[in-house]
Amino acid sequence: MFKKYKLHIMALVGYILYLLITEETVSFTMILMIIFSFAFVAWMLEELDKQNAN
């Protein structure tokens, strides 16, 4: 499933890393929110894959 979205995920990771490097004032809660949104997106894509497979 990650093969299809690998580029998108890598782009998002790169963007977040860029934000972390450029913004000195990134709080822990922001990082947590980013991680949770990543988990949510991954779960959504998995659900979509399940629906497409059926």
Image (cartoon, rainbow, N blue to C red):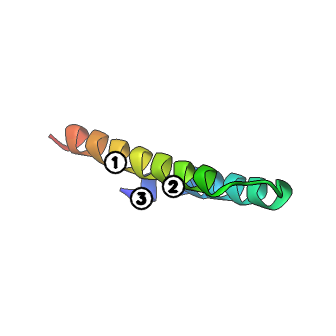
First in sequence: mark 3 vs mark 1: 3
Position of the N terminus, as image quadrant, is bottom left
Q: Percent from the top left, x then y, of residue 51?
A: 21, 38
> Could you tell me which secondary element the residue under label 1 belongs to?
helix
Residue bearing the label numbered 1: 43
- Looking at the rendered image, the disc whose residue lies closer to the viewer, 1 or 2, is 2
Disc 3/disc 2 C-alpha distance (Å): 17 Å
Left or right? Give the position of 23 relative to 10. right
Q: Going by the image, does 41 lie left or right of 52? A: right
Residue ID for mark 3? 2
Q: Nearer the viewer, residue 48 or 17?
A: 17
Tell me which residue sits at (60%, 58%) in the image. Answer: 10
Q: Can you give x and y, in whole percent of width and height, for residue 53 in the image?
A: 20, 44
Kind of residue indicated by mark 3: Phe
Q: Amino acid at mark 1?
A: Trp
Choose top left, top right, bottom left or bottom right for residue 49.
Answer: top left
Q: Mark 3 Cα within 10 Å, few/some/many (few <14, many 20+)?
A: few
Mark 2 lies on a secondary structure that is: helix
Q: Is residue 47 above or below residue 20?
A: above
Residue annotated with mark 2: 35
Kindly identify the amino acid type of the residue bearing the numbered disc 2.
Answer: Ile
